Amino acid sequence: MENKPRGIIGLIIVALFIFLGYRYYKDKKSWTMIVCKNKMANGIECYDDSYEIPNFKSEKDCLLEGARTFSKEGFECGKGCKKKDGLRVCSIICNKAGCN
């Protein structure tokens, strides 16, 4: 009987690690559409952002939705985007010109 509480606590800890690992993996792999508030002089890149739409499953899904919905405003799609010191930093960023 003394081992039962340890087993339950162990299962809870394992479940918590699985849940947190899934959330971390999902966030790292998802694409975010960044809608431009103002575009740079080249007319392609965002100078500053109006807002973001997260959780696209792929680069293609993000770019197609952006082209369909925000072609006039301008948009970019980023993978693994995080805010750092008030700036958006993405591991990959894509727009009409391609991906960097």
Image: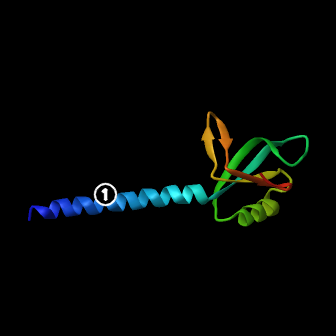
Extreme residue in the top direction: 85
Look at the image and name its color scheme: rainbow
Amino acid type of the residue tagged 1 in the rendering: Ile
**Residue 66 location in percent, x, y?**
77, 59
**Residue 71 location in percent, x, y?**
84, 56
Front-lying residue, 71 or 13: 13
Q: Is mark 1 on a helix, strand or loop?
A: helix
Q: Residue 35 vs residue 71: left or right? A: left
**Residue 46 location in percent, x, y?**
80, 44
Residue drawn where x is 82% and y is 61% of the image = 67
Quadrant for residue 14, please give it: bottom left
- Is 37 rendered above or below residue 24? above
Residue linked to disc 1: 13
| Disc 1 residue crowd, few under 14, some 14–19, many 20+, Cα 10 Å | few
Residue drawn where x is 61% and y is 41% of the image = 83
Extreme residue in the right direction: 42
The quarter of the image holding the N terminus is: bottom left
Q: Residue 54 vs residue 13: left or right? A: right
**Residue 59 location in percent, x, y?**
72, 62
Front-lying residue, 56 or 72: 56
